[in-house]
C-alpha cells in the first residue's frame, strides 16, 4: 500500500479529524513562508523581520512596521488551494472538527471552513488600539502611513506579534478540538513556534499524520509521514 492509499484509509476510518496547519499550506497559494530560503526571515530589510513584527517595534516605529506589513504580510490576491478546499470539504461532510492554524491569511475561512482556530490572529480583523472600534482589512491595505481611527488611535491588525500572548479563548478551543480528535493531521509547519506547536501534545487519538516537505519533531511518533506539498497530496484524497 502506498502512502496516499494509507492516508485515504486513515481518513475513511476517522470521524473527528483536526488539521493543524502552518505556513507551508499557503505557499501553494503564493504566500511566502517564514523560514525557507525565500521566506520572510531571509529577506533583507533595515531591521530583521522578527524585530519589525514585534509588539515593541509596532509602537516604537509604526511607520516602518506598516511599510513591511503592507508589502509582505498582506497578500489579497491569494486564493485557497486544494489543501484548504479539501479540509473544508471534510468539515462540511461532518468528518472534521475543524482547523487549528498558525496562519493569518484567512484562506481556510475563504475556502469554506467554519471551525477555524486562528492561533496567531488574522489580517482580516483590525482594531483601534484606543477605542477598540473594528476595521476591515481595507482600512489598512488601502491607507498610507500609519492608519488612524476617527478617535485618533492607531488601527492595529488583530495578529499576534512577537512579545504578545495568544488569545486564551482561541487556545482553549484549539486544545479542546485536538483532545477530541481521533485523527490529527499536522501539515505545513516546522513545529518550532511555541506555544502554538505545543498544542499537538494534547492529541490522544488514534491516528497522527504528518504531511510536510521537511522533517518535524512529531515524525517519529506519527502513524504516517508524507514528505510532499500538502495541496498535491490532498488533491488525491476523496471525502467518503
Image (tube, rainbow, N blue to C red):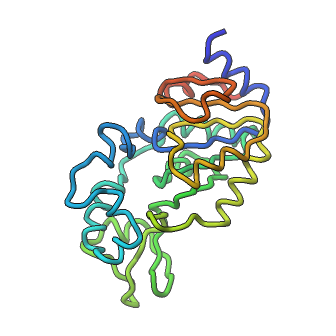
The residue nearer to you, when weighing 187 against 165, is 165
Question: In screen coordinates, is 116 left or right of 107?
Answer: right
Residue at far bottom of view: 151
Q: At 39% from the left edge and 86% from the top edge, which residue is drawn? A: 153
| Residue 172, horizontal then vertical, whole percent | 71, 60
On the image, which quarter does residue 117 sit in? Answer: bottom right
Residue 198 lies, in percent from the top left, at 62, 49
- Is 61 situated left or right of 217 in this image? left
The answer to whether residue 154 is left or right of residue 97 is left
Q: Give above or below for 98 relative to 214.
A: below
Tell me the quadrant of the picture where the C terminus can be found. Answer: top right
Which residue sits at x=39%, y=66%?
54
Q: Residue at x 74, y 50 (%)?
A: 177
Tell me where residue 195 appears, x and y as whole percent.
Answer: 58, 55
What percent of the width, then of the height, locates residue 33? 39, 43
Look at 69% across and 32% down and name the residue there. 208
Number of numbered markers? 0
User: Residue 135, relative to residue 107: is it above or below?
Assistant: below
Q: Residue furthest top?
A: 1
160 lies above or below 146: above
For the N terminus, give its image quadrant: top right
Amino acid at each position: 500500500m502506498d502512502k496516499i492509499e494509507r492516508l485515504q484509509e486513515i481518513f475513511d476510518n476517522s470521524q473527528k479529524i483536526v488539521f493543524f496547519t502552518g505556513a507551508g499550506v499557503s505557499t501553494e497559494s503564493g504566500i511566502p513562508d517564514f523560514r525557507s530560503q525565500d521566506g520572510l526571515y531571509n529577506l533583507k530589510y533595515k531591521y530583521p523581520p522578527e524585530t519589525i513584527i514585534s509588539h515593541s517595534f509596532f509602537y516604537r516605529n509604526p511607520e516602518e512596521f506598516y511599510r513591511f506589513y503592507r508589502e509582505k504580510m498582506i497578500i489579497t490576491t491569494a486564493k485557497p488551494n486544494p489543501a484548504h478546499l479539501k479540509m473544508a470539504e471534510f468539515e462540511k461532510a461532518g468528518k472534521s472538527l475543524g482547523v487549528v492554524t498558525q496562519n493569518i491569511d484567512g484562506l481556510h475561512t475563504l475556502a469554506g471552513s467554519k471551525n477555524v482556530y486562528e492561533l496567531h490572529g488574522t489580517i482580516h480583523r483590525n482594531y483601534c488600539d484606543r477605542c477598540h472600534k473594528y476595521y476591515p482589512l481595507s482600512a489598512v491595505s488601502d491607507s498610507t502611513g500609519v492608519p488612524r481611527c476617527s478617535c485618533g488611535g492607531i488601527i492595529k491588525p488583530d495578529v499576534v506579534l512577537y512579545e504578545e500572548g495568544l488569545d486564551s479563548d482561541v487556545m482553549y478551543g484549539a486544545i479542546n478540538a485536538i483532545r477530541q480528535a481521533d485523527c490529527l493531521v499536522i501539515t505545513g509547519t516546522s513545529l518550532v513556534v511555541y506555544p502554538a506547536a505545543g498544542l499537538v501534545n494534547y492529541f490522544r487519538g488514534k491516528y497522527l499524520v504528518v504531511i510536510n516537505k521537511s522533517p518535524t519533531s512529531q515524525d517519529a511518533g506519527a502513524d504516517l509521514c508524507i514528505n510532499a506539498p500538502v495541496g498535491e497530496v490532498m488533491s488525491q484524497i476523496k471525502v467518503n
